[in-house]
Image: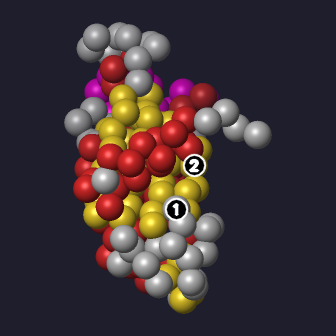
């Protein structure tokens, strides 16, 4: 993978009119290849390895929320970054998950070529499949460089997407509680 991306990067530099042998660009193909190895690590991740048996039976029926999870991803349409915050909540039935596993799940799916709409749903569905909770809610807020740097060039715009499953979809009260909590000021 690394060698192929290095070659492609060198070719890209030549195609846009640059000289890949110029001092500032000599190591660029290697750096770009290593960056893409990192940006795409979600394709090589295994959810079971990420969870690492951190699911615990617990008599908990109140909402669990991890909010303000920073994420970055790459837009599959332009291969330009988008980034922002993700908020995840669930209503346990019998099981809870180690809190640190939720941001790791976000990372698995965000470190792939993505669109924010699909990313939001993948996170929600994965938590639903892993825990079988009463409900799951995911809200993502993202800034898309493909909208800020090109096209409409709107630097202050951001996109909000949500995925509500189970009780979060059925109950306006549950959904409102979740949305209220994620909207509160940080402490």
Query: 136 or 152: nearer the eye?
Result: 136
The answer to whether residue 185 is left or right of residue 48 is right
Q: Quadrant of residue 128?
A: bottom left
Q: Which residue is the extreme one toward the right? A: 187
Residue at image location 38% in from the left, 61% down from the top: 136
Crowd rating for badge 2 (residues with CA inside 10 Å; few <14, some 14–19, many 20+) = many
Please give the count of numbered marks on the rendered protein. Answer: 2
Residue situated furthest front in the rendering:
173
* Left or right: 15 in relation to 102: left
Badge 1: residue crowd in 10 Å (few <14, some 14–19, many ≥20): some
* Label 2: element kind: strand
User: SS class of the residue under badge 1?
Assistant: loop
The picture places residue 29, in percent across and down from the top left corner, at: 47, 44
Q: Position of residue 174 (x, y in %)?
A: 40, 53
Image height of 43 relative to 68, above or below:
below
Left or right of 184 on screen, residue 29? left
Mark 1 sits on what residue? 63
- Which residue is at the front of the view, 5 or 187? 187
Q: From which residue to which does the magenta span run?
A: 10-23
Residue 27 in the magenta stretch? The answer is no
Q: Relative to 26, does residue 91 appear above or below in the rendering?
A: below
- Across and down, in percent, residue 25 comes to 54, 32
Mark 2 — residue?
67
Residue 162, disc: none
Q: Residue at x 45, y 67 (%)?
A: 91
In this view, 54 is above or below 87: below
Residue drawn at the location 67% of the way across and 33% of the way down: 185
- Quadrant of the image containing the C terminus: top right
**How is the protein colored in the picture?**
secondary structure
Q: Quadrant of the N terminus?
A: bottom left
């Amino acid at each position: 993978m690394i060698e192929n991306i290095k070659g492609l990067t060198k070719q890209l530099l030549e195609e846009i009119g640059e000289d890949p042998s110029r001092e500032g660009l000599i190591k660029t193909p290697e750096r770009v290849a290593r960056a893409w190895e990192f940006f795409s690590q979600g394709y090589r991740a295994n959810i079971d390895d990420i969870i690492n048996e951190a699911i615990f039976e617990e008599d908990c029926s109140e909402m669990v929320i991890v909010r303000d999870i920073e994420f970055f991803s790459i837009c599959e349409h332009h291969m330009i970054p988008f980034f922002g915050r993700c908020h995840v909540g669930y209503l346990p039935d019998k099981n809870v998950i180690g809190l640190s596993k939720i941001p790791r799940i976000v990372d698995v799916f965000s470190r792939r070529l993505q669109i924010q709409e699909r990313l939001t749903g993948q996170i929600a569905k994965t938590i639903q499949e892993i825990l079988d909770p009463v409900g799951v809610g995911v809200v993502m807020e993202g800034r898309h460089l493909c909208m800020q740097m090109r096209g409409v060039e709107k630097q202050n715009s951001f996109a909000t997407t949500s995925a509500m499953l189970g009780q979060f979809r059925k109950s306006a009260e549950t959904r409102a509680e979740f949305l209220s909590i994620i909207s509160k000021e940080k402490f």
